Every structure is written in structure tokens, then in C-alpha cells.
Amino acid sequence: MNLNATLLMASEGGKPNPMSTLFFMGAMIVVMYFFMIRPQMKKAKEQKAFANQNNAGDIIVTIAGIYGKIVKANDDGTIMVEVDRNTIIKMDRSAISMEMTAAYRKKLGTEVKA
């Protein structure tokens, strides 16, 4: 230890300052909020908006990797997706993958709605 740290500990009696510990913990919580929690909330909000803006006729990719075309959008939050001729499946709107659909549309050269 250097001389300054030794003198500081001797003058304070070797006890850490509780205010500095409290300040450090508060700063850690703020950093976690801005770097971890807030971006996740923002991404979830964007995903929900993306899923709600897709309508009949849009080509999509689901989270499971199923490619299809929306045939009908139901009022209960589900969609009917045609995955092959005469093969229609019903799924929830939240199952649409924003990243995969945008990449697929970019690959096809069509407009990206994200």
C-alpha cells in the first residue's frame, strides 16, 4: 500500500465510508438499467409493433423458421399462414420473426417494413 492510502485508513479508523458504498450500488443499478433492461424493453416494443403491422399478402418467416404468406389476419391476435399450396396453419402474431423476415425481404429485394 502506498503512503496516502495508509494515512487515509489511519485517519478514518480503517472503516469504509457507507455513503460511497451506497453511491456505488446506485450507480451500478443505473448502469444496468441503461445497458440491459431499457434496450430489451425497446426491442420487445419494436417486435410487437412489427407483428401488428403485418397484414394479408405479406411474406413472413416465423421464429421457428417456417416461411409463409399471411392469408388472413384474425381479430383475436392470430393469423392464418399459407406454407404450401392448400396448407394453411393458424398461429399467433407474436410468432413472426422481425429479423428473419427483414433479412428475407432484403434478399428478395422487396420493401422492408421494419
Image (cartoon, helix red, strand yellow):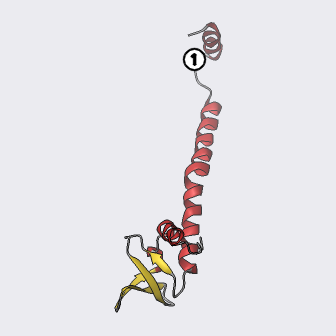
Three-letter amino acid code of the residue under disc 1:
Gly
Residue, x 38% and y 75% (percent of image)?
Answer: 66
Observer-nearest residue: 38 or 11? 38
Residue, x 46% and y 74% (percent of image)?
Answer: 96
Quadrant containing the C terminus is bottom right
- Residue identified by numbered label 1: 14
Q: Quadrant of residue 20?
A: top right
Residue, x 55% and y 51% (percent of image)?
Answer: 36
Residue, x 64% and y 37% (percent of image)?
Answer: 23
Observer-nearest residue: 73 or 37? 73
Tag count:
1
The relative height of residue 42 versus residue 72 in the rendered view (above or below) is above
Looking at the image, residue 109 sits to the left or right of residue 100; the answer is: right
Q: Quadrant of residue 15?
A: top right
| Residue 61 drawn at (x, y percent) | 44, 74
| Residue 3 drawn at (x, y percent) | 62, 7
Query: Which residue is the extreme one toward the front?
Result: 109
Helix, strand or loop status at disc 1:
loop
